[in-house]
Amino acid sequence: MELNKKYYLGDGENYFIYRTDKYNAETIRAELFDKNGEAMAKTLVKGGMADADRSHHEVINGFEIFVATNS
């Protein structure tokens, strides 16, 4: 997982980027964007109040499901 790098989903259009949280640099979030660069969803990846620890594959699967159910 590399911060600020675009990771494309299987459809080749939607992508997500890992970013540090605005208020806590130890917390990492992933944000999903459509082909036009508009934000669609966010998810907690590491840290945060829930002490999350999601793998790269879990993030991909979650966003793939989101795209499939919201298109």
Image (cartoon, rainbow, N blue to C red):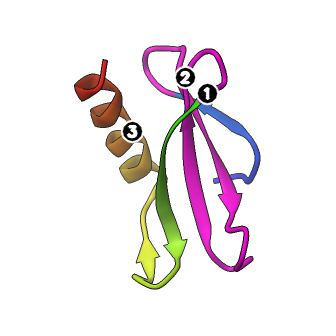
What residue would you read off at disc 3?
A: 63
The residue tagged with tag 3: helix, strand or loop? helix
Whether tag 2 and tag 3 are in contact, CB under 8 A, the answer is no
What residue would you read off at disc 1?
A: 38
Q: Earlier in the sequence, mark 2 or mark 3?
A: 2
Q: Which callout, 2 or 1, points to the residue nearer the camera? A: 1
Q: Amino acid at mark 1?
A: Glu
Whether tag 2 and tag 1 are in contact, CB under 8 A, the answer is yes
Report the Cα–Cα distance between label 2 and label 1: 6 Å
Instruction: Choose top left, top right, bottom left or bottom right for residue 28.
Output: bottom right
Q: Amino acid at mark 2?
A: Asp
Residue visible at 64% across and 52% down?
18
Badge 2: how crowded within 10 Å, few (<14), some, or many (20+)? Answer: some
Badge 3: how crowded within 10 Å, few (<14), some, or many (20+)? Answer: many
Q: Which callout, 1 or 3, points to the residue nearer the camera? A: 1
Q: Which residues are magenta?
A: 9-38
Instruction: Choose top left, top right, bottom left or bottom right for residue 19.
Output: bottom right
Whether tag 1 and tag 3 are in contact, CB under 8 A, the answer is no
Q: Position of residue 40 (x, y in %)?
A: 49, 35
What residue would you read off at disc 2?
A: 34
The stretch drawn in magenta includes residue 21: yes
The residue tagged with tag 2: helix, strand or loop? loop
Report the Cα–Cα distance between label 2 and label 3: 11 Å
Q: Position of residue 30 (x, y in %)?
A: 56, 52
Q: Which callout, 2 or 3, points to the residue nearer the camera? A: 2
